[in-house]
Image (spheres, grey):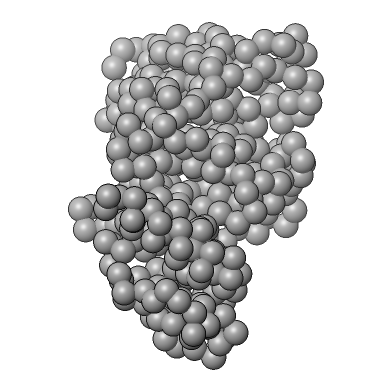
Amino acid sequence: MNTTISERYHRQVILPKFGEKGQQKLLWSKVLVIGAGGLGYPALQYLAAAGIGHIGIVDDDIVSLSDLHRQILYTVNDIGLSKAVKAAAILQDRNPEIKVVAYPERLTSKNALAIINDYEIVIDATDNFASRYMINDACVLLDRPLIYGAVSQYEGQVAVFNYRKSETDEKVNYRDLFPQPPGENEILNCAGAGVLGVLTGIIGTMQANEVIKLVTGIGEPLINRLLTYNGLNNQIYELNLRARPGTHLLIPVSKEDFKTTDYISLCRGQWQNEIDHAFFDKLLISGNINIIDVREMNESPAIDEFPNYRIPFDNLQENLSAIQADTVVTICQSGKRSLQAAKQLAAIFGTSKSVYSLRGGLLEWKKQHAKQSV
């Protein structure tokens, strides 16, 4: 390590368990930050200052006046300029020893895999659900650690997804926390709900801290843990996370399928736990599933293609003990009653079970399978 670089990073190099080896690991690392706004700007500044050797910045947005109360990397003179390009220029000027690359474009399912593939760790600093699910799925397909962060009003969250310390540990991803996107307008983003400016700095800095811990091996990263911080009372609490049964089936099975997935459409609709016949067939193969036929006892046609329980909709509450599997699919003639039943069961079981309703019902499923057999 040359003298100039050694002097720049001296205060962290002298840290116990860090040293020149830790600094060299940072200089060799490649980190992608998706979003150069409220969360991205503090993460970027500290990653560049710490000596991350190669930083990528993805953002298609431009600087606006309403950004400046929390995105203090920019000034009024930057209004109208590309956030990614401006941020890259500032960071490169502050630390000429590293490489900063700007991607002034929207991350989509068409380009996400190609961009993310060039980096070792990804920071999600976005503010919408379509991007979060897309980034998560891409990181799972490419086997990249994902540093998640989110803020709303006075609270923020941080977690490390898709990473394990040893071969025996399980990998948890964002879908294990939130299997399906919320309905359109069900949860407001920062533009609609508001956010305390300083909160984005706190959470974004925490994300940068998680990157440094992963790269250097110091401390205890938030692997499979969700940290929530309340800016009003400084309360912090953690939630241990586990892989949820069946959620891996929600992720595209191949890179080709990923590229054709419309993540914006996935975040629209009233209740996202309706599944189509193709996904239902995947669940049948996966096992550990209870299929609940909520039709009345005298309704036909009968179901003889797969095991199921016939529990009429009005009798669900008194027959909950029959539902033992981790994954539950409700089914009826057309999908209407099963949707209501699934909502009820989801409210009862919470995160302990994955609950779905078969869209279109039994009749549509039989129709699709009849076509396939022709």
Q: Nearer the viewer, residue 229 or 171?
A: 171
Q: How far from the left and from the top, in percent, is residue 11?
A: 44, 29
Going by the picture, which residue comes out furthest to the bottom? 318
Going by the picture, which residue comes out furthest to the front? 374
- Residue 291's place in the image compared with 82, above or below, is below
Q: How far from the left and from the top, in percent, is residue 52?
A: 40, 24
Q: Nearer the viewer, residue 123 or 281?
A: 281
- Residue 347's place in the image compared with 69, above or below, is below
At a point 71% along the width and 46% down the height, the residue shown is 185
Q: Nearer the viewer, residue 165 or 336?
A: 336
Q: Is residue 128 visible?
A: yes
Q: How far from the left and from the top, in percent, is residue 37?
A: 63, 27
At a point 34% along the width and 12% down the height, the residue shown is 3
At a point 28% along the width and 62% down the height, the residue shown is 286
At a point 45% along the width and 53% down the height, the residue shown is 276
- Residue 316's place in the image compared with 10, above or below, is below
Seen in the image, is 348 located left or right of residue 24?
A: right
Q: Is residue 288 visible?
A: no
- How many numbered discs? 0
Q: How far from the left and from the top, in percent, is residue 45?
A: 55, 24
Q: Name the quarter where the N terminus is drawn.
A: top left
